[in-house]
Image: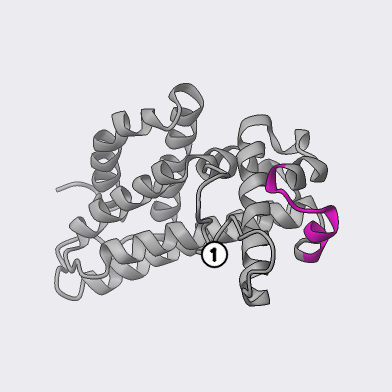
Amino acid sequence: MDVGSPFHPLGAPVVLPRGPHGLDREVVLASQRGRLLTAFVAQAADRGVSAVTISDIVRVAGTAKRTFYEHFRDKDDCFLQAFDVASEIVVGALVDAVAAEPDPVRRIECGVRAYLASLVAHPEFARLFLTHMRAASPELADRYAEWVEMLAGALVQWRRESRETRPDVPELTRLQALAAIAGVNEIVGLTLHADGVQGIGGVTEELVALTVTFLTADVSGRPAG
């Protein structure tokens, strides 16, 4: 994400007018927080979390250190809040994509495409969270695990609802959903590392097809035939 872009993920303006501007304090605080989050993510995605200091973050964001501490407890808290913003973006894209699709197979296809598109739209977020989140602090690792579990739970619930009209489609288990999410994330992470965000487009069709096949397989353990 470009730290110079006019808007950050929360929707408040990144660049405030110079001098007296009459903006509400909430707007100013949202802008400051957005600039700090964007600055942290952009630098950490390129250099690694450990290499980024709070001084680096406020320099790029154009704020004072005291402003940083008005919003975040420390760098890990900044990381955690950035992840929360990113997860809201991703989950919102998924929900919007599948909300009007009753067919369970089409739901998977639409959901995977929306997920990949959201990662392409926010490559710094994708690189940071898919490669650094689990290796960060225990709190961050726990939040990542909670997020994956939440996505898996949503997939299972959507399948349960869909099976009311399409009982021929196999039930989706929690383990199957977790495996699919982990597989997609790992492939995307490897692709970002090797080829950058432009590489995701090259694997999208195959990844969608693989995920649909995997998530519509009968894994009940019953012998075939």
Q: Which residue is mark 1?
A: 12
Q: Is residue 97 above or below residue 184?
A: below
Residue with the most extreme top position: 194
CA neighbours of label 1 inside 10 A, class few (<14), some (14 to 19), many (20+): many
Identify the image quadrant of residue 103.
Answer: bottom left
The image shows residue 73 at horizontal and vertical percentages of: 81, 61
The image shows residue 90 at horizontal and vertical percentages of: 44, 57
Identify the image quadrant of residue 26.
Answer: bottom right
Residue with the most extreme right position: 66
Q: Nearer the viewer, residue 83 or 215?
A: 83
Q: Does the segment drawn in magenta span residue 68?
A: yes
Q: Secondary structure at mark 1?
A: loop
Residue drawn where x is 27% and y is 42% of the image: 208
Residue with the most extreme front position: 19
Regarding residue 142, the answer to whether it shows in the image is yes
Residue drawn where x is 61% and y is 49% of the image: 38
Left or right placement of residue 98 versus residue 19 in this view: left
The amino acid at mark 1 is: Ala
The image shows residue 142 at horizontal and vertical percentages of: 67, 57
Q: Is residue 56 above or below residue 164?
A: above
The image shows residue 188 at horizontal and vertical percentages of: 43, 36
Residue drawn where x is 63% and y is 77% of the image: 24
Left or right placement of residue 192 versus residue 50 in this view: left
Q: Does the segment drawn in magenta span residue 59?
A: no
Residue bounds of the magenta highlight: 60-70
Residue drawn where x is 31% and y is 50% of the image: 112
Regarding residue 143, the answer to whether it shows in the image is no
Q: Nearer the viewer, residue 124 or 130?
A: 124
Q: Nearer the viewer, residue 76 or 152?
A: 76
Q: Nearer the viewer, residue 143 or 72?
A: 72
